[in-house]
Image (cartoon, coloured by chain):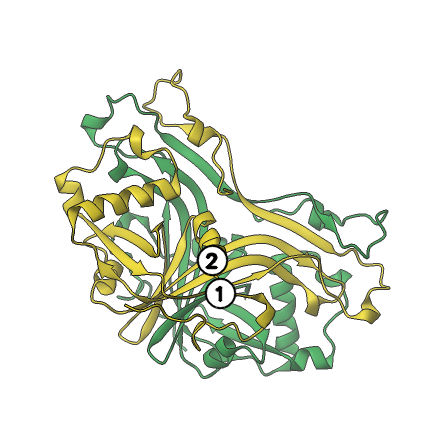
Chain colours: A yellow, B green
Protein backbone atom coordinates (compact mmCIF):
# COMPACT_ATOMS: atom_id res chain seq x y z
CA UNK A 1 0.00 0.00 0.00
CA UNK A 2 1.34 3.46 -0.77
CA UNK A 3 2.35 5.68 2.10
CA UNK A 4 -0.31 8.04 3.40
CA UNK A 5 0.93 11.61 3.54
CA UNK A 6 0.58 12.63 7.15
CA UNK A 7 -1.27 14.30 8.62
CA UNK A 8 -4.60 13.49 7.03
CA UNK A 9 -7.70 15.56 7.77
CA UNK A 10 -8.44 12.96 10.46
CA UNK A 11 -5.08 13.11 12.22
CA UNK A 12 -4.14 16.78 11.86
CA UNK A 13 -4.01 18.51 15.23
CA UNK A 14 -6.51 21.36 15.00
CA UNK A 15 -6.51 22.69 18.54
CA UNK A 16 -3.07 24.03 19.56
CA UNK A 17 -1.61 23.16 16.13
CA UNK A 18 1.93 23.88 17.35
CA UNK A 19 1.61 20.78 19.52
CA UNK A 20 1.15 18.49 16.52
CA UNK A 21 3.81 15.85 15.74
CA UNK A 22 3.90 14.23 12.32
CA UNK A 23 7.34 12.66 12.00
CA UNK A 24 7.65 8.92 12.48
CA UNK A 25 10.76 9.10 14.65
CA UNK A 26 9.13 11.21 17.37
CA UNK A 27 5.89 9.26 17.25
CA UNK A 28 7.83 5.97 17.48
CA UNK A 29 9.69 7.30 20.56
CA UNK A 30 6.29 7.82 22.19
CA UNK A 31 5.10 4.35 21.14
CA UNK A 32 8.30 2.74 22.39
CA UNK A 33 8.19 4.45 25.78
CA UNK A 34 4.51 3.64 26.34
CA UNK A 35 3.56 0.42 28.09
CA UNK A 36 -0.17 0.31 27.43
CA UNK A 37 -2.28 1.60 24.58
CA UNK A 38 -6.00 2.30 24.52
CA UNK A 39 -7.70 0.60 21.60
CA UNK A 40 -10.92 2.11 20.27
CA UNK A 41 -13.36 0.20 18.07
CA UNK A 42 -17.06 0.31 17.32
CA UNK A 43 -19.57 -2.47 17.90
CA UNK A 44 -23.28 -1.95 17.13
CA UNK A 45 -22.69 1.80 16.94
CA UNK A 46 -21.16 1.95 20.41
CA UNK A 47 -17.48 2.90 20.76
CA UNK A 48 -15.41 0.83 23.18
CA UNK A 49 -11.99 1.77 24.58
CA UNK A 50 -9.91 -1.04 26.04
CA UNK A 51 -6.39 -0.92 27.53
CA UNK A 52 -3.93 -3.37 25.95
CA UNK A 53 -0.25 -4.11 25.75
CA UNK A 54 1.37 -3.82 22.36
CA UNK A 55 4.64 -4.19 20.53
CA UNK A 56 6.14 -2.46 17.52
CA UNK A 57 8.18 -3.89 14.69
CA UNK A 58 9.16 -1.33 12.09
CA UNK A 59 6.03 0.32 10.74
CA UNK A 60 3.62 -2.15 12.36
CA UNK A 61 2.01 -2.30 15.75
CA UNK A 62 1.12 -5.71 17.18
CA UNK A 63 -1.74 -6.46 19.55
CA UNK A 64 -2.46 -9.84 21.08
CA UNK A 65 -4.86 -11.62 23.35
CA UNK A 66 -7.10 -14.59 23.73
CA UNK A 67 -8.89 -15.97 20.66
CA UNK A 68 -11.96 -15.84 22.93
CA UNK A 69 -11.66 -12.06 23.39
CA UNK A 70 -14.73 -10.22 22.10
CA UNK A 71 -12.63 -7.23 21.22
CA UNK A 72 -9.96 -9.09 19.29
CA UNK A 73 -12.58 -11.06 17.39
CA UNK A 74 -14.25 -7.77 16.49
CA UNK A 75 -10.93 -6.25 15.36
CA UNK A 76 -10.27 -9.44 13.40
CA UNK A 77 -13.37 -8.62 11.31
CA UNK A 78 -11.32 -5.81 9.79
CA UNK A 79 -13.10 -2.91 11.48
CA UNK A 80 -11.59 0.55 11.82
CA UNK A 81 -9.57 0.99 14.99
CA UNK A 82 -7.86 3.82 16.81
CA UNK A 83 -4.84 3.06 18.97
CA UNK A 84 -3.79 5.81 21.38
CA UNK A 85 -0.70 5.89 23.60
CA UNK A 86 -0.42 8.62 26.25
CA UNK A 87 2.59 9.49 28.41
CA UNK A 88 1.95 11.83 31.34
CA UNK A 89 4.93 14.09 31.98
CA UNK A 90 3.61 16.62 34.47
CA UNK A 91 0.89 18.79 35.94
CA UNK A 92 1.21 22.43 34.91
CA UNK A 93 0.21 24.81 37.72
CA UNK A 94 -0.61 28.28 36.42
CA UNK A 95 -1.79 31.44 38.21
CA UNK A 96 -5.23 31.31 36.60
CA UNK A 97 -7.26 28.11 36.72
CA UNK A 98 -7.93 28.53 33.00
CA UNK A 99 -4.22 28.24 32.19
CA UNK A 100 -3.61 25.02 34.10
CA UNK A 101 -2.58 22.18 31.84
CA UNK A 102 -0.80 18.86 31.57
CA UNK A 103 2.57 18.12 30.05
CA UNK A 104 2.20 14.97 27.98
CA UNK A 105 3.10 13.18 24.79
CA UNK A 106 0.51 11.17 22.92
CA UNK A 107 0.29 9.22 19.69
CA UNK A 108 -2.78 8.19 17.71
CA UNK A 109 -2.87 5.57 14.93
CA UNK A 110 -5.93 5.01 12.75
CA UNK A 111 -6.41 1.98 10.55
CA UNK A 112 -7.53 -1.61 10.21
CA UNK A 113 -5.87 -4.49 12.00
CA UNK A 114 -5.14 -7.77 10.23
CA UNK A 115 -4.74 -11.20 11.79
CA UNK A 116 -1.20 -12.57 11.71
CA UNK A 117 -1.46 -16.05 10.17
CA UNK A 118 2.16 -16.92 9.42
CA UNK A 119 3.51 -18.93 12.40
CA UNK A 120 6.97 -17.35 12.19
CA UNK A 121 5.61 -13.81 12.10
CA UNK A 122 3.23 -14.68 14.94
CA UNK A 123 6.05 -15.94 17.17
CA UNK A 124 8.20 -12.95 16.26
CA UNK A 125 5.30 -10.60 17.05
CA UNK A 126 4.90 -12.22 20.47
CA UNK A 127 8.65 -11.77 21.03
CA UNK A 128 8.34 -8.07 20.08
CA UNK A 129 5.41 -7.70 22.48
CA UNK A 130 7.42 -9.34 25.26
CA UNK A 131 10.52 -7.27 24.56
CA UNK A 132 8.39 -4.12 24.46
CA UNK A 133 7.07 -4.79 27.97
CA UNK A 134 10.23 -6.21 29.51
CA UNK A 135 13.37 -6.16 27.34
CA UNK A 136 15.49 -9.21 28.07
CA UNK A 137 12.71 -11.38 29.43
CA UNK A 138 11.96 -13.54 26.37
CA UNK A 139 15.21 -15.54 26.52
CA UNK A 140 14.66 -16.47 30.20
CA UNK A 141 11.21 -18.03 30.00
CA UNK A 142 9.43 -20.99 28.52
CA UNK A 143 8.37 -20.20 24.95
CA UNK A 144 4.74 -20.63 23.91
CA UNK A 145 3.76 -24.20 23.00
CA UNK A 146 1.35 -25.23 20.24
CA UNK A 147 -1.72 -25.10 22.52
CA UNK A 148 -0.81 -21.64 23.81
CA UNK A 149 -0.15 -20.34 20.30
CA UNK A 150 -3.53 -21.64 19.15
CA UNK A 151 -5.21 -19.85 22.06
CA UNK A 152 -3.52 -16.57 21.13
CA UNK A 153 -4.72 -14.16 18.47
CA UNK A 154 -2.15 -11.71 17.14
CA UNK A 155 -3.20 -8.67 15.14
CA UNK A 156 -1.02 -6.37 13.06
CA UNK A 157 -1.88 -2.70 12.56
CA UNK A 158 0.08 -0.84 9.88
CA UNK A 159 1.31 2.52 11.16
CA UNK A 160 0.24 4.58 8.16
CA UNK A 161 -2.23 7.20 9.32
CA UNK A 162 -0.96 8.66 12.55
CA UNK A 163 -0.08 11.76 14.51
CA UNK A 164 1.30 12.78 17.87
CA UNK A 165 0.66 15.66 20.20
CA UNK A 166 2.77 17.02 23.03
CA UNK A 167 2.95 19.82 25.56
CA UNK A 168 6.06 20.61 27.56
CA UNK A 169 7.50 23.43 29.58
CA UNK A 170 6.25 25.91 32.19
CA UNK A 171 2.77 27.40 32.50
CA UNK A 172 1.78 30.26 30.20
CA UNK A 173 -0.23 32.82 32.08
CA UNK A 174 -1.89 36.05 31.04
CA UNK A 175 0.42 39.04 31.45
CA UNK A 176 -1.75 40.58 34.15
CA UNK A 177 -1.64 37.40 36.26
CA UNK A 178 2.16 37.21 36.58
CA UNK A 179 2.16 39.70 39.44
CA UNK A 180 0.01 37.47 41.71
CA UNK A 181 1.71 35.71 44.59
CA UNK A 182 0.41 32.24 43.64
CA UNK A 183 3.07 29.53 43.22
CA UNK A 184 3.33 28.36 39.63
CA UNK A 185 5.39 25.67 37.98
CA UNK A 186 5.37 22.05 36.91
CA UNK A 187 5.05 18.91 39.00
CA UNK A 188 6.80 16.18 36.96
CA UNK A 189 5.01 12.83 36.62
CA UNK A 190 6.33 9.48 35.45
CA UNK A 191 5.43 5.82 35.62
CA UNK A 192 7.90 4.43 38.13
CA UNK A 193 8.67 1.03 39.58
CA UNK A 194 8.66 -0.15 43.16
CA UNK A 195 10.66 -2.97 44.77
CA UNK A 196 10.19 -6.28 42.92
CA UNK A 197 7.97 -8.74 44.82
CA UNK A 198 9.06 -12.37 44.66
CA UNK A 199 6.49 -14.96 43.68
CA UNK A 200 5.58 -16.90 46.86
CA UNK A 201 6.82 -20.11 45.19
CA UNK A 202 10.31 -18.70 44.53
CA UNK A 203 13.38 -19.57 46.57
CA UNK A 204 14.01 -16.16 48.24
CA UNK A 205 17.73 -16.57 47.53
CA UNK A 206 17.11 -16.43 43.78
CA UNK A 207 18.40 -13.17 42.29
CA UNK A 208 16.03 -10.71 40.69
CA UNK A 209 17.20 -10.25 37.06
CA UNK A 210 18.84 -6.95 36.11
CA UNK A 211 16.10 -6.18 33.57
CA UNK A 212 13.61 -6.22 36.47
CA UNK A 213 15.83 -4.45 39.02
CA UNK A 214 16.83 -1.67 36.59
CA UNK A 215 13.52 -1.49 34.76
CA UNK A 216 12.73 1.84 33.11
CA UNK A 217 10.45 2.96 30.29
CA UNK A 218 12.97 5.65 29.27
CA UNK A 219 15.28 4.51 26.48
CA UNK B 1 -33.78 8.10 34.35
CA UNK B 2 -34.10 4.74 36.06
CA UNK B 3 -30.93 3.00 37.15
CA UNK B 4 -29.46 0.54 34.67
CA UNK B 5 -28.81 -2.82 36.28
CA UNK B 6 -25.13 -3.42 35.87
CA UNK B 7 -23.55 -5.13 34.15
CA UNK B 8 -25.34 -4.89 30.85
CA UNK B 9 -24.47 -7.22 27.96
CA UNK B 10 -22.12 -4.43 26.81
CA UNK B 11 -20.24 -3.97 30.07
CA UNK B 12 -20.14 -7.54 31.42
CA UNK B 13 -16.57 -8.84 31.60
CA UNK B 14 -16.57 -11.98 29.45
CA UNK B 15 -12.89 -12.90 29.42
CA UNK B 16 -11.58 -13.68 32.93
CA UNK B 17 -15.04 -13.03 34.43
CA UNK B 18 -13.64 -13.20 38.00
CA UNK B 19 -11.85 -9.93 37.22
CA UNK B 20 -15.12 -8.05 36.65
CA UNK B 21 -16.12 -5.24 39.03
CA UNK B 22 -19.70 -4.01 39.10
CA UNK B 23 -20.10 -2.10 42.35
CA UNK B 24 -20.04 1.69 42.22
CA UNK B 25 -17.77 2.13 45.21
CA UNK B 26 -14.88 0.17 43.71
CA UNK B 27 -15.33 1.69 40.26
CA UNK B 28 -15.42 5.19 41.82
CA UNK B 29 -12.16 4.45 43.67
CA UNK B 30 -10.59 3.71 40.28
CA UNK B 31 -12.06 6.87 38.74
CA UNK B 32 -10.92 8.99 41.69
CA UNK B 33 -7.34 7.68 41.61
CA UNK B 34 -7.02 8.09 37.83
CA UNK B 35 -5.70 11.36 36.45
CA UNK B 36 -6.50 10.96 32.77
CA UNK B 37 -9.26 9.10 30.96
CA UNK B 38 -9.35 7.95 27.35
CA UNK B 39 -12.51 9.09 25.60
CA UNK B 40 -13.75 7.09 22.64
CA UNK B 41 -16.25 8.42 20.11
CA UNK B 42 -17.13 7.80 16.48
CA UNK B 43 -16.96 10.30 13.66
CA UNK B 44 -17.77 9.28 10.07
CA UNK B 45 -17.51 5.63 11.07
CA UNK B 46 -13.99 6.04 12.46
CA UNK B 47 -13.42 5.57 16.21
CA UNK B 48 -11.18 8.13 17.91
CA UNK B 49 -9.57 7.78 21.33
CA UNK B 50 -8.38 10.96 23.01
CA UNK B 51 -6.76 11.43 26.45
CA UNK B 52 -8.52 13.97 28.68
CA UNK B 53 -8.69 15.11 32.25
CA UNK B 54 -11.96 14.63 34.06
CA UNK B 55 -13.71 15.18 37.34
CA UNK B 56 -16.44 13.32 39.17
CA UNK B 57 -19.35 14.64 41.16
CA UNK B 58 -21.60 11.94 42.56
CA UNK B 59 -22.84 9.79 39.71
CA UNK B 60 -21.61 12.12 36.96
CA UNK B 61 -18.30 12.45 35.17
CA UNK B 62 -17.32 15.88 33.85
CA UNK B 63 -15.16 16.56 30.80
CA UNK B 64 -14.06 19.97 29.63
CA UNK B 65 -12.13 21.71 26.94
CA UNK B 66 -12.19 24.42 24.35
CA UNK B 67 -15.45 25.22 22.58
CA UNK B 68 -13.29 24.99 19.44
CA UNK B 69 -12.37 21.33 20.14
CA UNK B 70 -13.54 19.01 17.35
CA UNK B 71 -13.97 16.22 19.82
CA UNK B 72 -16.03 18.14 22.36
CA UNK B 73 -18.23 19.56 19.62
CA UNK B 74 -18.78 16.02 18.39
CA UNK B 75 -19.63 14.78 21.90
CA UNK B 76 -21.92 17.78 22.29
CA UNK B 77 -24.00 16.38 19.42
CA UNK B 78 -25.10 13.66 21.84
CA UNK B 79 -23.17 10.78 20.32
CA UNK B 80 -22.35 7.59 22.20
CA UNK B 81 -19.08 7.74 24.10
CA UNK B 82 -16.89 5.36 26.03
CA UNK B 83 -14.73 6.72 28.85
CA UNK B 84 -11.97 4.41 30.09
CA UNK B 85 -9.66 4.94 33.05
CA UNK B 86 -6.70 2.60 33.52
CA UNK B 87 -4.35 2.34 36.49
CA UNK B 88 -1.20 0.28 35.98
CA UNK B 89 -0.18 -1.53 39.17
CA UNK B 90 2.55 -3.88 38.02
CA UNK B 91 4.16 -6.19 35.49
CA UNK B 92 3.59 -9.85 36.27
CA UNK B 93 6.63 -11.99 35.42
CA UNK B 94 5.73 -15.67 35.05
CA UNK B 95 7.83 -18.72 34.16
CA UNK B 96 6.11 -19.18 30.80
CA UNK B 97 5.78 -16.24 28.43
CA UNK B 98 2.11 -17.18 27.99
CA UNK B 99 1.39 -16.53 31.68
CA UNK B 100 2.92 -13.07 31.83
CA UNK B 101 0.37 -10.40 32.63
CA UNK B 102 -0.20 -6.94 34.03
CA UNK B 103 -1.70 -5.99 37.36
CA UNK B 104 -4.13 -3.18 36.75
CA UNK B 105 -7.48 -1.65 37.61
CA UNK B 106 -9.67 -0.19 34.89
CA UNK B 107 -13.12 1.34 34.60
CA UNK B 108 -15.31 1.75 31.54
CA UNK B 109 -18.37 4.01 31.27
CA UNK B 110 -20.70 3.97 28.28
CA UNK B 111 -23.26 6.66 27.57
CA UNK B 112 -24.07 10.02 26.06
CA UNK B 113 -22.57 13.26 27.29
CA UNK B 114 -24.69 16.39 27.73
CA UNK B 115 -23.53 19.99 27.67
CA UNK B 116 -23.66 21.76 31.02
CA UNK B 117 -25.60 24.99 30.44
CA UNK B 118 -26.33 26.18 33.96
CA UNK B 119 -23.57 28.67 34.93
CA UNK B 120 -23.46 27.52 38.55
CA UNK B 121 -23.18 23.84 37.61
CA UNK B 122 -20.55 24.74 35.04
CA UNK B 123 -18.39 26.57 37.57
CA UNK B 124 -18.86 23.76 40.09
CA UNK B 125 -17.90 21.18 37.42
CA UNK B 126 -14.71 23.13 36.70
CA UNK B 127 -13.97 23.19 40.42
CA UNK B 128 -14.49 19.41 40.61
CA UNK B 129 -12.16 18.97 37.63
CA UNK B 130 -9.54 21.13 39.29
CA UNK B 131 -9.88 19.38 42.64
CA UNK B 132 -9.66 16.01 40.89
CA UNK B 133 -6.32 16.90 39.34
CA UNK B 134 -4.86 18.86 42.24
CA UNK B 135 -6.89 18.94 45.47
CA UNK B 136 -6.47 22.30 47.20
CA UNK B 137 -5.46 24.26 44.11
CA UNK B 138 -8.77 25.96 43.26
CA UNK B 139 -8.77 28.32 46.27
CA UNK B 140 -5.24 29.59 45.43
CA UNK B 141 -5.73 30.70 41.84
CA UNK B 142 -7.62 33.26 39.80
CA UNK B 143 -11.10 31.93 39.00
CA UNK B 144 -12.31 31.81 35.40
CA UNK B 145 -13.67 35.10 34.08
CA UNK B 146 -16.61 35.51 31.69
CA UNK B 147 -14.44 35.28 28.56
CA UNK B 148 -12.72 32.13 29.79
CA UNK B 149 -16.02 30.53 30.78
CA UNK B 150 -17.45 31.27 27.33
CA UNK B 151 -14.41 29.64 25.72
CA UNK B 152 -14.87 26.49 27.81
CA UNK B 153 -17.26 23.67 27.02
CA UNK B 154 -18.20 21.41 29.92
CA UNK B 155 -19.86 18.06 29.31
CA UNK B 156 -21.57 15.81 31.84
CA UNK B 157 -21.67 12.03 31.43
CA UNK B 158 -24.05 10.13 33.71
CA UNK B 159 -22.32 7.10 35.26
CA UNK B 160 -25.10 4.61 34.57
CA UNK B 161 -23.74 1.85 32.36
CA UNK B 162 -20.30 0.91 33.64
CA UNK B 163 -17.95 -1.82 34.78
CA UNK B 164 -14.47 -2.26 36.09
CA UNK B 165 -11.82 -4.92 35.68
CA UNK B 166 -8.79 -5.68 37.79
CA UNK B 167 -5.95 -8.14 38.17
CA UNK B 168 -3.75 -8.32 41.23
CA UNK B 169 -1.34 -10.69 42.88
CA UNK B 170 1.46 -13.00 41.80
CA UNK B 171 1.84 -14.85 38.49
CA UNK B 172 -0.14 -18.03 37.94
CA UNK B 173 1.97 -20.61 36.15
CA UNK B 174 1.26 -24.10 34.93
CA UNK B 175 2.10 -26.72 37.55
CA UNK B 176 4.89 -28.18 35.42
CA UNK B 177 6.62 -24.79 35.07
CA UNK B 178 7.03 -24.11 38.81
CA UNK B 179 10.17 -26.25 38.94
CA UNK B 180 12.08 -24.05 36.47
CA UNK B 181 14.80 -21.77 37.81
CA UNK B 182 13.38 -18.62 36.18
CA UNK B 183 12.75 -15.69 38.53
CA UNK B 184 9.05 -14.90 38.82
CA UNK B 185 7.17 -12.20 40.63
CA UNK B 186 5.67 -8.76 40.27
CA UNK B 187 7.35 -5.46 39.49
CA UNK B 188 5.07 -2.80 41.00
CA UNK B 189 4.26 0.26 38.89
CA UNK B 190 2.75 3.58 39.86
CA UNK B 191 2.47 7.11 38.56
CA UNK B 192 4.88 9.05 40.73
CA UNK B 193 5.94 12.67 41.04
CA UNK B 194 9.37 14.24 40.70
CA UNK B 195 10.70 17.43 42.31
CA UNK B 196 8.46 20.44 41.55
CA UNK B 197 9.96 22.81 38.98
CA UNK B 198 9.43 26.52 39.67
CA UNK B 199 8.04 28.64 36.86
CA UNK B 200 10.96 30.80 35.59
CA UNK B 201 8.97 33.93 36.52
CA UNK B 202 8.60 32.89 40.17
CA UNK B 203 10.63 34.34 43.03
CA UNK B 204 12.70 31.23 43.96
CA UNK B 205 12.09 31.98 47.64
CA UNK B 206 8.36 31.36 47.22
CA UNK B 207 7.30 28.15 48.96
CA UNK B 208 5.90 25.24 46.95
CA UNK B 209 2.40 24.54 48.34
CA UNK B 210 1.90 21.37 50.39
CA UNK B 211 -0.61 19.99 47.89
CA UNK B 212 2.17 20.06 45.27
CA UNK B 213 4.98 18.86 47.55
CA UNK B 214 2.95 15.98 48.97
CA UNK B 215 1.03 15.19 45.80
CA UNK B 216 -0.23 11.64 45.48
CA UNK B 217 -2.98 9.93 43.47
CA UNK B 218 -3.59 7.47 46.33
CA UNK B 219 -6.40 8.59 48.62
Query: In front here: A32 or B75?
Result: A32
Query: In front here: B132 or A61?
Result: A61
Label number found at residue A22: 1
- Asked whether, in this view, residue A179 is left or right of residue A160, the answer is right
- Check disc 2 and report the residue beneath it: A27
Query: In front here: A121 or B213?
Result: A121
Label 1 SS: loop
| Placement of A140 over or under B141, stated as above or below | above
Query: In front here: B127 or A89?
Result: A89
Q: Position of residue B73 (x, y in %)?
A: 50, 81
Q: Position of residue A18 (x, y in %)?
A: 60, 69
Q: Chain ID for label 1?
A: A
- Asked whether, in this view, residue A103 is left or right of residue B91, the answer is right
Residue located 40% across and 55% down the image: A37
Query: Do residues under tags 2 and 1 come within 8 Å of each other at their CB atoms?
Result: yes
Residue located 27% across and 57% down the image: A156
Asked if marks 2 and 1 fall on the same chain, the answer is: yes
Q: From where the camera sits, is residue B28 visible?
A: no
Earlier sequence position, callout 2 versus callout 1: 1
Residue located 63% across and 57% down the image: A168
Q: Position of residue A215 (x, y in %)?
A: 47, 35
Q: Residues within 10 Å of mark 1 (few under 14, many from 20)?
A: some
Q: Chain ID for label 2?
A: A
Q: Position of residue A32 (x, y in %)?
A: 44, 49
Amino acid sequence: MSEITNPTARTRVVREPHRGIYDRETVYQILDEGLVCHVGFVSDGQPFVIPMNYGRSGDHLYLHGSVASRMLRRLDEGVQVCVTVTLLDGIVFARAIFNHSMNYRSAVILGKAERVEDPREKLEALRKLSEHIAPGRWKDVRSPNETELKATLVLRLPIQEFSGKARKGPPLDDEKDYSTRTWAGVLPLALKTGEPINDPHIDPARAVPDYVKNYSRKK
